[in-house]
Structure formats: structure tokens, C-alpha cells
Image: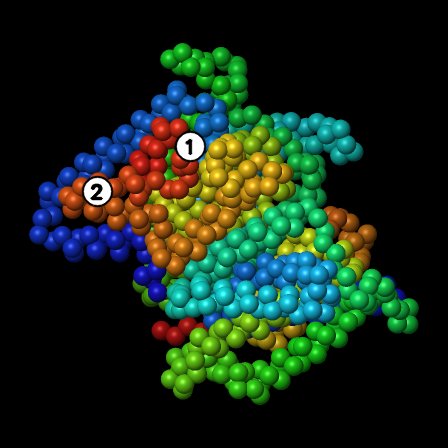
Amino acid sequence: MSEQTVSRPAGGSRAASSTPARPARTIRRGTVVKWVLIAALLVFLLVFPLYFDEFWLRTGFAVFGAAIGAIGLNLLVGTTGQLSLAHAFFLAVGAVSYTYISGESGGLGTRAALQGLGLPPIVGMVVGVLLAGLAGLVFSPIAARLRGIYLGVASLGLVFIGVHVINTWTPVTGGFNGRAAPEFSLFGFTFGNSDPQLWVLGVPFREAERLWYLGLVLALAAYVFARNLLRSRPGRALQTLRDSEVAASVMGVNVQAYKARVFLVSSMYAGLSGVLYALSIGSIAPESFTLVVSIQYLAMIVLGGLGSVGGAALGALFVTALPLLFQQYADVLPLVSAPGQGGISAGFAARFLYGAAIILIVLFEPAGLAGIAQRLTQRLRRGRAPARGGATTPPPEQPGSAPTPSVRPSQGSDTR
Amino acid sequence: MTQFLSLLLNGLSLGAIYALIALGFVIIFKASEVVSFTHGSLLLLGAYSIARLSEPLGFLLAVLVGLVVTALAAFLIERLIINRLRGAPVISLAIVTIGVDIILLTELIRRIGPDILNVPHPWGGESVRIGGIGITQNRLIAMIVAGVLIALFFVAFKYSSWGVAMRASAEDGETAALMGIRQGRVSALAWVVAGVLAGVAALFLVGSPTPGVSSAVYATALRAFPAAILGGLDSTGGALVGGLLIGLAESLAAGYQEQLLFLGRGFGEVVPYVVMIAVLLVRPSGLFGTKELTRV
């Protein structure tokens, strides 16, 4: 049973047992390669805004936001084995709180006037994350009592209730039409187009460039935190919980408490992701937090590989960037077309693709993209130079027409 | 009082439709341990086929073909995907059905688009009055048909060899297999039955007072999930009770909307989920579900 979902530990032990004779040298070589790749990826991500235009930066920011949410959901579903479809709800809590706390009061032109506290955006972000965590904590007693699949359907309810509340609570959420999200700023430095004007190496740093770095820093922090959490004592406890609750409690793991905590952490991740989502779209609306969104997040972690932090980030890249890329290159791609031109529209095409990918992954590669990446690195470590590595690695979101530099992020991110 | 009785009757008829869907959901779970998230789009597939075929084929034939299409789709999902994953964790199985749902739903929504497809029910949109209580003919017929189907199902479940085989394999799959019960066949048949039930539910769900087949039907079908959960995922009787409860709750909340205005407009559509969460708080395995016992 656990064979299906365990990705890292199983893979690691397989590597160790298959190469017992020459441990020291190969590991050192593998580690060096790994660090070089990580450094290259970091440098690439840092200089990215200097070379790419706004479309790529905006896509990147959306991916960073989604990656944070996916990592959070993965802690809950992948690591602890609690199927949750409520992620959109927690995203909504974060996004709405941020908009309410940092937004200004004012009329909407309709009967209802919008309310807002007008506090600094950083306060809105922090409180948004905390409130999302609180919502998770409030739901966790229900969640902790429900076994596996009951939780999956029960959490479905939260999403519908959440959308209803957003539709109804107009003064706070803007109601059916939504409301604009305030621009982010940090101690007087705004993440907008001006104020202060900024040039780096001759490149004007406007909103997209500034947000890119914000997203990068937050996503990296979220990644490192989750990695460390999984390697720590609580992380092992959560993995045991997934494999067998009975075994976990026999080993002294307080099942209820751990379930509550993982819900807390996961929904805090979702809250942060929601705030970034509001920043990336520039507004919030009920249809941004429907069941479809929950399912997208589930798709991300399944594609990436349940239980793998890097996999979640990869999955987020795949699911988030795909529709945007399809939209951008609709006229060059076969089958895909702009809405109303007979072909399949970008959003639909992306959904077909990741729907099929989910089925194929569960059927043939339960460890997901992370599993595939791991197999490749193992081959690399054994010294068999993977000449065709490049051919198999890039996830299919690179259409043939994409500019060549975009090949790099996906290759690099395999090592994450 | 008349309003209350009328809401009650309409709630029961809606609940009967929900019960049909929930029943399919439950027998799939019993036979193959899968929580089928495809059920909503299967139902939409049935509704779509009936609506599209009723022009060339005529109503009756269209309904028949629609039921066959839904059952066939369910059968194919079981054979091609679920059957290969026997013994996989419940979560993987649920996720795979979500994958199927994404594809099926996307294609159906793409085909339906913003339109509302009309299903020409021969009984039309008229309503009947029974002592001052109004109900549309469609809902009345739905209630009768659902009642008959559910009764038939329970009889078959209890006495037919298929029912016995299915109950045996739900009880203990391994032992049932050793007794010569073919698990694959039981599971496939359960999916087919669930598909037919979903198809019948679709036929009535898109009749008056609902305007016709649109992508909103999917959201309605989803409200049968709380019905199944609230009755207890592995209890067929629970599905019936859960369906009726959800139908009643929804109808009453929608009917007394003016009095419940502080909860917001359209609260009726959310009320099934609220009821579900409330019930699960008290009984984590639903009203009639088997409690999971843990032995060390």
C-alpha cells in the first residue's frame, strides 16, 4: 500500500542497495553535480527579469504563488495522506483577508460600500496567512475525526460554503463582482510600476520585475521550510501517519494533534498562496476560488509526485504555466485556438492535458515527475551519461514554438 | 401551511433524484472501494446525450440510448482504469476518478457552451395540484420512478445472486473471491448499475422546474455527494435517507429564502454541504455508515 505513495525514502534506499561497492566517490560526484545545478538554477532565476519580458515574469509570479500553495497541499495530502479538496477555501481566506485588511474603504458605485482597514500590505499578508491558518485549525477537529475519503468529500463542502460567503459578504469581499487587491509594498518600497523609479543594469524595474523577486523569495522560503519540516521528527511522524495511523500511535505519535498541526501549516501555505494570487491577478472574485481551483492544486501535487516538495513546485509550474502558454501561443499551436475560432481554447486544452496526465501518472508512475527526475539523477550518478536526458526531462509545457531560453528552467528545476 | 407542505413534497421529489445518484455512488464504493468523483460528469453525460439525441431519435429512444451511453461510459472507466488499480490506496483511486472527471467534464462543457439544451419531456412543464399543493408533473413522475427503481434495487440487492455476490465481496473481498465470486465482474456490474441510475436521475434533473441541460447541472449533481456521505458511504439505506434529507433541506432553505436572507441569497444551494458537515461533526461515519474499528 505504501509502495504507491512513498517516493523519496524508497528511491533513496534503492539507490543505496544497488550500488553498495563504491559509495564514497559516486556520492561525492553526485553531490557536486547537484550543487552546481542548484547554483545555476538560482543564478538563472535571479537574472531572469533582466532578459525576459512582462508576460514571462507575470507567468513566473503566478507559478511561484501556486508552488507555495501546492507545497502546502502536498504536506497534507502527499505526506500525511489526508485527501483535501478544501484548498481553494483556504486560498480564499488568505486573499480576502489581505484585500480587506490592506484595502481602502470606498464606494463601489453600487449600494454597498466597500470596507477596508487600510493597514500596510505586509500586515495584510501576515494576518491573511494567520487567518487562513486559523480557519484550518477550526476545521481540523472535524478533519481529524474523519477517515481518509470522508474528509475528501467533507472538505468539498468548505469550497462551496466559501464561494457562497464571498458572493454574499459584499462589504468585505466585493461580492459577485469582486474587488481590486491593493498593491504590495514593504516599508515604503512599493511593488508597483513607479515610486521609486528603478533601473537595474539599464532594465527598468516595474511591477512585474519587482513582484518576480517577491515571489521568488517567498517560494524559496516556503520550499526550504517544507524540506526541513519533512526531514525533522514531525515530518517522519506525518509520514508514519499516512502509512498507518495505528502504527503511528503505537510509536507515540499523537494522531489528533499531528493532524491538526499539519492542517494548520497546510492552510497557512494556502493563505500565503492566496495573497500572492490576489497580487498576481490584481483583484479577487468568487470564481477564482471554486472547486476547479482545488482540483488544479490536487493535479499539481499528483503530477509532481505525492510527498515530494520539489515535485509540488514542478507540478505547479506545469499546471499554472500551461494555460498561459497555450493562450500566448494559440495561433502557432495545432488544435489550440483563440476562443470562438473552432479549435480548443487554451484553458480547455490545458485541462485535457493535465486530466490525462493525472490518469497516466496514477496508472504508470505513482511517484510523479519527481520520481522520473529521481530515476534520471540516479542514472547520472551511476556514471552512465544520460545522453538523451534532455529529451525526456522537459515537461510537455514547452511547445515547440517557445523561445529556446525557456528550456533551462525545467531542466534545472529537476534537481530541486 | 400549504407552502410548507408544498416545499415538503417538492423537497421529497428532489431528494428522490438525489437518492438515485447517491445510491450509485454507494454501490460503486461497496463493490470497488472507489469514491467516484466522476459521478457528476457521468450524469451530465447522460443529460447531454438525451438532449442531443431526442431530436433525431424521438424522446423514448433517446432516453434509452442515453442510459446506454452513461452505463457504457461507467463500464469503460471501470474496465480501463479502475480494474487495473485493484488494491491501490483509496486516495489514488479517488484521484484517478478526478482525472477522468476533468476530461469528461471539460469536453461536455466545451460542447454545451453557454447554451441551455432543451429536453422535450412528453409531460412538459405543467404542474399538478393535489389539494392545494403544487408540484410539477416532472417531479411527480420522478418521485414515482425513483421509488420503483430504488425498491427494485433493494429487492435485487437482497435476493438476486448479483446482490448476494456484491454484498459478499463488500463484506470481505478475499473470502468472496475464494468462494468463486468474480470480483471484476461484480465491480463492473456495480459501475453499470450506477451509470444507469445516474442516467435516470439526469433525465428528471433537467426537467421542469430546471430549465434544461446546462453546465450548472453538474453543480446540482455534486450535491448528491453530501447525500451519500451523510447517510454513510457504505450504506445503501443511508444513501436513500441522505438523499431525501438533502432534498428536503435544500427545498426548505430555498422556499424560506426571504426569512433566511441574513444568510445570503442562494443559500439553498449551499445548505446540503452545511447539513453534511453538521452531521459529520456528530457522526464521523455518517448516519448509517459502519464505524471503522481499529484493532492492534
Residue at mark 1: chain: A
SS of the residue at dot 1?
loop
Q: Is residue B207 above or below residue A56?
A: below
What's the amino acid at mark 1?
Answer: Ser
Residue at 60 percent across and 69 percent down: it is B68
Within 10 Å of the Cα at label 2, are there few (<14), some (14-19), or many (20+) other Cα atoms? some
Residue that mark 2 sits on: A386
Residue in view at x 81 percent, y 52 percent: B258
Q: Which residue is mark 1?
A: A401
What colouring style does the render use?
rainbow
**A273 to B219, vertically: above or below:** above
Q: Quadrant of the C terminus of chain A?
A: top left
Name the spot of residue A278 as percent of width and height, x first. Answer: 55, 34
Q: Earlier in the sequence, mark 1 or mark 2?
A: 2
Taking depth in this image into account, of A85 and A355 the one nearest to the observer is A355
- Let me know if residue A146 appears in the view: no
